[in-house]
Amino acid sequence: MKHKYDVIIIGSGPGGLAAAIAAKKNGADDVLIIERDIELGGILLQCIHNGFGLEIFNKDMPGPSYAQHFIEEALGLGIEVILDTMVLDITPERKITATSKRIGFIELQARAIVLAMGCRERSRAQIMLPGTRPAGVYTAGTAQRWVNIEGYMPGKRFVILGSGDIGMIMARRLTIEGAKVERVLEIMPYLTGLTRNYVQCLIDYDITLQKSHTIKNILGNKRVEAIESVAVDEKWNPVPGSEEIIPCDTVLLSVGLIPENELSKNAGVTLDPITGGPFVDDRFMTNVPGIFAAGNVVHVYDLVDWVTEAGYVAGRSAANFAMKEKITKISHVPLSASENIRYVVPHAINRESLKEETVRLQMRVKTPIEEHVRIIVEDEQGNLLTRKSEAYARPGEIITMEIKSDAYDDVQNAKQPIVSLHKR
């Protein structure tokens, strides 16, 4: 094993694998993937349901099959891999400290790094869920791994808190395995996952979703025995008299995902307090030169295909950075989101990007609008850079739009383009 690499990728999920492949294909000779698990593929390995590859391959694939395509390509390109290895630290100078029981402590130097650590689930403690502390309270992703990989059923009667995609998918999976999903509760007045998952996983399996509801209390001693649900008002305050006891033996939490960025903070990467991921430009470079980020470590995507595409961009950009003998100063145009848009990624556009390619913007709205909307990107003088119409806008579904090269001159002259959304 070498100690100096052109590009090192941390994480081997869809973003990390794509980044490694793109880096290798774009001139980086020495490319290394560091993975803390015992095999490549990341979270895809436990996602045995279909829905992957629809955009990239025009196929409806299960997660492991989607991952295997990129694993084989990466290994075929001669990309080096270290498995069962935990990265402990990254410095702004792109030095990496890692450890594993096989190789002990190692120190590596990279000319460029791609952060691809993915995201983690919010826990019971983070949402301050009240009640006793019996066995039988799990995150939906933990239950997914138990059922799909380990072959264990975590319970027989379930209540799922949150209408995130993993929770809805697990509602269907558990029903197929013979369990009873008593209820899915969502504190928001709208769905937080994809509509297709609501239809395919809840409606098709006759599973009840109650919006504007949450868990007021978890009941049980050694094991969950029931939960007390309650309706909430627009300020999330419990509605007196709406309480209901729902018998169950297991509670699954599907209450949001958080980009995994402890290592990013060590490296001096600035994080967006809204997304929880790094501030990045359209080439997915962070504020630290030579450190890039791709996939759910930046913001949580709806489709794995988009994670892969982001990985391609980050890997290509990392290779270009690593292969330059002299690093030139980069000039950015920062993007600003209006009050009706929660966030926009990327956070800034490299002034030279539109010379080479279209720049993709992805965003989420704060509240749903169930009618035609128009998204506008304009400079501070009101000059239009690009616009797009959508049939609706929902927080659980990313809106994607592009700024094309014919807007290059206008972007060059802009100080801070504004992205806004309007009802048509």
Image (cartoon, rainbow, N blue to C red):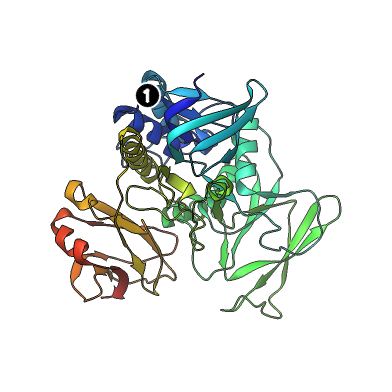
Name the secondary structure under disc 1.
Answer: helix
The image quarter containing residue 332 is bottom left
Measured along the vertical axis of the image, is residue 415 above or below residue 396?
A: below
The residue shown at (82%, 59%) is 132
- Image spot of residue 221 (x, y percent): 86, 54
**On screen, residue 221 above or below 292:** below
Residue 53 in which image quadrant: top left
Q: Is residue 250 above or below residue 89?
A: below
Residue 285 picture location, percent across and down: 38, 48
Q: Is residue 234 left or right of residue 130?
A: left
Quarter the C terminus occupies: bottom left
The answer to whether one can see residue 83 in this image is yes
* Residue shown at the point (68%, 23%) measured from the top left: 101
Image location (x, y in percent) of residue 183: 62, 59
Of 378 and 153, nearer the camera is 378
Q: Residue furthest front?
A: 326
Mark 1 nearby-residue class (10 Å; few <14, some 14–19, many ≥20): some
- Along the viewing direction, whichever of 398 and 135 lies nearer the viewer: 398
Q: Position of residue 402 (x, y in %)?
A: 24, 56
Q: Residue furthest bottom?
A: 240
User: Label 1: which residue?
Assistant: 73
Quick check: 394 above or below 59?
Answer: below
User: At 57% across and 51% down in the image, what residue appears?
Assistant: 167
Determine the residue located farthest toward the right in the rendered image: 221
Say what amino acid the circle numbered 1 marks.
Answer: Glu
The answer to whether one can see residue 48 in this image is: no
Please state if 355 lies on the left or on the right of 17 as rendered. left
